[in-house]
Amino acid sequence: MSKEDDFQSILENGISFGRGGERRNPNEGKVKTKAKKKQYVTGAHGSGSARQKAKYREQRANRRHK
């Protein structure tokens, strides 16, 4: 290719300085967790340890509300 062809292709297509390749899914690699869902926070899903943790969370939340 000549310099004029390079220049013309740059004018038509532009220059990309970003990363090349395919776009990635923003949720890729993230761990899905149930820890923040309401049933788990309140201990309503049946697990004894979850009920106990919910009790401790409630006590902690109510410490300053006397």
Image (tube, rainbow, N blue to C red):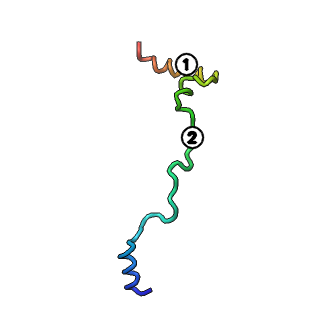
Mark 1 Cα shell of 10 Å, populated few (<14), some (14-19), many (≥20): some
Residue on which the image places disc 1: 55
Q: Is residue 16 left or right of residue 43?
A: left
* Residue 11 position within the rendered picture, expressed as x and y whole percent measured from the top left: 35, 76
Which amino acid is tagged 2? Lys
Q: Residue most toward the top? A: 66
Q: Residue most toward the bottom? A: 2
Q: Is residue 8 left or right of residue 21?
A: left
Q: Residue most toward the front? A: 12
Residue at figure coordinates x 50%, y 50% from the top left: 26
> Which comes before the other along the chain, label 2 or label 1?
2
Which amino acid is tagged 1? Lys
Per the model, the C-alpha gap separating discs 2 and 1 is 24 Å
Residue at figure coordinates x 55%, y 50% from the top left: 28
Quadrant of res 62: top left
Residue on which the image places disc 2: 32
Quadrant of res 52: top right
